[in-house]
Image: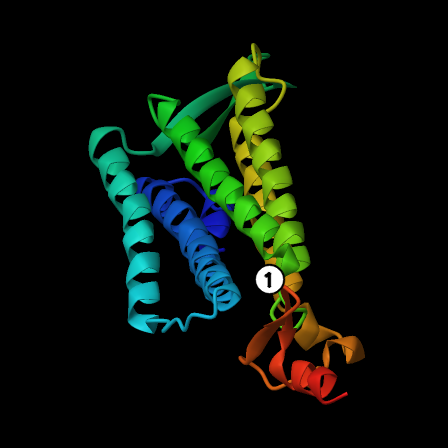
Amino acid sequence: PLGALLLASAPSKGTCIASVWLINVGYTLVLVPTLVRVSALIKVLQAGKKFRRVAVDKKKLVKTSVGISCIAAVFCAIWTGLDPMKPQEQLILTDETNDLGETIVGVSYYCKSESDAWFWIVFFWQGLLLASGSALAFQLRSAPKIVNDSNKLSFMLYSSFMFLVFRVALLVFSRSLLDDSVTKISLQMIESIFWSIDSIVNIFIYFYKFFLKDENSKEQARPGKFGYNNGQATPLLQQEEEETL
């Protein structure tokens, strides 16, 4: 994402604040619509088991996605207002000396807030979204194959959780440094790489069918029409053929 690129760029007050908004709101906007869509699909399948019709209100799904994303936006606004991310200076002793024999001191800048509580709230929010997605993926596992994205969703969530653990470990490591053996901007650039890889992996997982020719994904059933035969969800076309036999 753009926020990850800003983390890797030269820190300034503008880039530090913009990276907070782009990363946190963007992360929510990527995950939440998928979770809302899967949740609606599960409700439709559950209603089908009881032979009830369900009308999916697309506007309601959009409002739900925007509403949850607004929570992230409000959090970022509070963070920016109370304790904004801003460039911090780090002095680094080098092994080089000038013509007078004086040790050269390097200066490095990185983005940081006064309190680390903001970062832990972000980690908690991201973990909550991933846990919710895992629960939905578990419920979706028995859905018809034509709409069953549980494996793809689970893989995407597992990948995101792995990079979340990496980011948590990176924060703990950066705060435990007792010397200047590693510059904070270097760790910030590593965090940027984690965000970028996380986004690229998720995009590939979700749209891999457009990148690879998957002949097995072609279904003969008409999309969107399902029935229940002996308590198991099957496409209506397949079910009609079974009943004809």
Report the colour scheme.
rainbow
- From what the image shows, is residue 66 above or below residue 164? below
- In the image, taking residue 169 as reference, residue 111 lies left or right, namely left
Q: Which residue is mark 1?
A: 203
Instruction: Give the image quarter of residue 225.
Output: bottom right
In the rendered image, the quadrant that contains the C terminus is bottom right
Q: Position of residue 178 (x, y in %)?
A: 56, 10
**Location of residue 72 with respect to 174 vertically, above or below:** below
Residue under the image location 64 percent in, 44 percent down:
158
Residue at 39 percent across and 22 percent down: it is 116
Residue at the image point whose x is 25% and y is 37% from the top = 80
Q: Position of residue 90 (x, y in %)?
A: 46, 22
Residue 139: x and y in percent read 57, 52
Question: Toward the viewer: 190 or 132?
Answer: 132
- Relative vertical location of residue 5 with respect to residue 34 in this rendering, above or below: above
Residue 2 position within the rendered picture, expressed as x and y whole percent measured from the top left: 46, 55
Q: Residue at x 59, y 57 (%)?
A: 140
Element class at badge 1: helix
- Relative horizontal placement of residue 18, taking residue 41 as reference (left or right): left
> Quick one: 81 or 44, which is closer to the camera?
44
Q: Residues within 10 Å of mark 1 (few under 14, many from 20)?
A: few
Q: Nearer the viewer, residue 102 or 83?
A: 83
